Image (cartoon, rainbow, N blue to C red):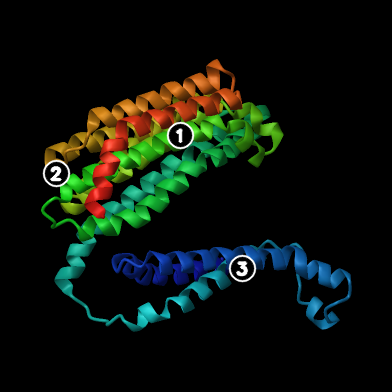
Amino acid sequence: IHLFAWILFVDAISVIPFAKLRADGKPFRYSLIKFTNIGTFIGLNLVFIFVIPFLIKNGIIDEWLSSWYKGRWVGYVFVANLIASLVTLLMLLPQFAALRLKFNKQLFYNMFGYSWPVLVANLSFIINENLDKILLGKYLPNNIANHDVGIYGAVCKLAVFISIFNTAFRLGAEPFFFSHAKNENAKQTYATILYYFVLALSILFLGLTANIEIIKHFINSRYWSGLDAVPVLLFGYVCLGIYMNLSVWYRLSDQTRYGLYISLVGAVFTIVMNIILIPKYSYMGSAWVSMFAYFIIMVISYWLGQKHYPIPYKLKSMATYVLVSILSVGLSFWVFNRNIYIGNTILLLFLLGIFYFEKDNVKKLLRKNA
C-alpha cells in the first residue's frame, strides 16, 4: 500500500510537466520520457523476476546481498513501477525548473469548474471499461464464471490495439485542438481531422479482423472460443475513438458538464444492460453492451455538439466508410469464416476504394501543406 501511494504521488506531480510538454508541442521528448518509463519498468521486472534468481542460483552475487531478496514477492512489480516513475520525474526536472509557483484564485475556480466534470466523466469511463468483467463473475453460475471471465479478459486484450491508437491520437490531438481554437478555420480543421481519423479507424478495424487468425496467437489457445466477441469489441473502440474526437466541442466551449452527462448515460446503460444480458448471453452480452454504450455516447455527443458548437463534419462520407468496413468485417469474419486470404483481399479492395475516392482530397492537402 505504501509503495502504491508513492507511485500515485510521483505520477500525480508528473502530470503538469507532461501537460506542458504537450502544450509546447514537444512530442518527441514527451514520447522519449514515456518510452523510458515503460522500458525501465519492464527491464526492472525482468531483473527482479529472472536475473536476480539466476545470479543467486549460480552463486554469482554475494550471500549477504542475496539474503535481501524475497523470492517471488509480488511487491517487486510495485518497486519497479516506483523506480520507473522516479526516473520519469528526474527527466522532467527541466520542465519543473521552468515553472513559477503563483496562486491565482480566479484561475483556480475556473480550472476546478472546468475539470471536475471531466474527472467524474473519466470515472464513468473506468466503469464502462472494467465493470463488465466484475459483473460477469457476479451474475454467471459459479461453475462457468471464472472460465468465461478468463475468455472475455483475453479477447479484450486483442481489441486493445484500437484503444492504444485512440489514446495516442488523443494525447497528440488535444493540445492541437486548443492551440487552434481561435483560428478562423478551426472548425473546418477539426472536421477534416475527424474525417481522416475515421478513415484510419475503419482501416484498422477491418485490418485487425482480417488478420484475426494471426492476432489470436497473442492469447492462449484455450481462449480462442471467445474470438466472436473481438469484432464487436473492436467496433466499440471505433465508436469510442470517434467520441473522443467529437468531445472537442464541450472542451473548447467550456461546457464540460455535458461530458459528465454523456458519460453517466453510458455508465448507467452499461450497468443495467449487463445485469440483464449476462445471465443469458455471458461475455457476448457484455461485448455487445460495451459496443452499444460507446455507440450511444458517440451519437449523443454528435447531436449535442451540433446544437452548441456546430462543426461541419462530412457525416455521410464518414458513415459510408464505417458501414462499408462493418459489412467487410462481417464478410471476412463470419461469411468466410476468418479466412486470412479472403480477409486480406477484402482489406485490399477497401484500401483501393479509399484511394480512388480520396486521391483528389489528398492531393489538395499535400498542395496546401507544400
Question: Which numbered circle lies on residue 80?
Answer: 3
As helix, strand or loop, the secondary structure at mark 3 comes to helix
Question: Which numbered circle lies on residue 205?
Answer: 1
* Marks 3 and 1, the one that precedes in the sequence: 3
View extreme (top): residue: 335
Across and down, in percent, residue 202 comes to: 40, 34
The residue lying at 45 percent from left, 64 percent from top is 31
Q: Report whether 332 appears left or right of 167.
A: right
Give the residue type that dot 1 points to: Phe
Q: Nearer the viewer, residue 27 or 115?
A: 27
Which mark is in front, 3 or 1?
A: 1
Give the residue at mark 2.
309
Q: Report whether 106 appears left or right of 11.
A: left
Q: Cα distance, mark 3 to mark 1?
A: 34 Å
| Within-10-Å neighbours for mark 2: few <14, some 14–19, many 20+ | some
Q: Cα distance, mark 1 to mark 2?
A: 29 Å
Q: Quadrant of the C terminus?
A: bottom left
Q: Report whether 330 appears left or right of 187.
A: right
Q: Nearer the viewer, residue 348 or 243?
A: 348
Q: Is residue 14 visible?
A: yes
User: Quadrant of the rendered structure where residue 198 is?
Assistant: top left
Q: Nearer the viewer, residue 132 or 59?
A: 59
Give the residue type that dot 3 points to: Ala
The residue lying at 31 percent from left, 36 percent from top is 359
| Within-10-Å neighbours for mark 1: few <14, some 14–19, many 20+ | many
Q: Nearer the viewer, residue 33 or 52?
A: 33
